[in-house]
Image (tube, rainbow, N blue to C red):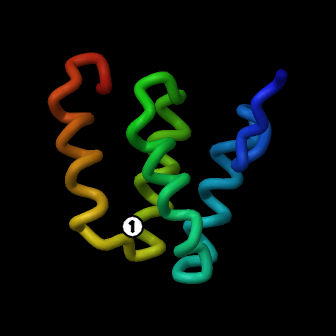
Amino acid sequence: IESKDPLGKPEDKTDVLQLLGNLGLESKDAIPLILKVLGDKNEKYQNRSAALNALVKIGVDVKELLPVLNSILKDENSY
């Protein structure tokens, strides 16, 4: 069974994340998905970067963002 990614094909994910960020608050329902991309160690750097930018543009609550960022900073392979 093939798993469908709600953000589309892997090659389109960066574009989708950028679009969500450009929509700003209209994309607030996508915050959990975007946080998942940001925190996923297996995601491409470009997708994780686009996810962080989208979250900033949407205006995510820092309380939601800090645990994910903290986890990334503790992972030596994240950067």
Q: Vertically, is 54 above or below 8?
A: below
Residue bearing mark 1: 56
* Residue 50 locus on image (x, y percent): 51, 49
Rendering quarter of residue 57: bottom left
* Residue 6 locus on image (x, y percent): 72, 48
Q: What residue is shown at x 44% (from left), y 58% (from top)?
A: 53
Q: Vertically, is 17 above or below 31?
A: above
Q: What residue is shown at x 62% (from left), y 65% (from top)?
A: 20
Residue lying at the far top in this picture: please name it: 77
How many numbered circles does the render carry? 1
* Residue 55 locus on image (x, y percent): 43, 63
Specify few, some or many for label 1: CA neighbours under 10 Å numbering under 14, 14-19, or 20 or more.
some
Q: What residue is shown at x 41% (from left), y 53% (from top)?
A: 52
Rendering quarter of residue 64: bottom left
Q: Please state if 9 lies on the left or on the right of 65 as rendered.
A: right
Q: Quadrant of the N terminus?
A: top right
Q: Please state if 63 lies on the left or on the right of 49 as rendered.
A: left
Q: What residue is shown at x 49% (from left), y 58% (from top)?
A: 32
Q: Nearer the viewer, residue 5 or 47?
A: 5
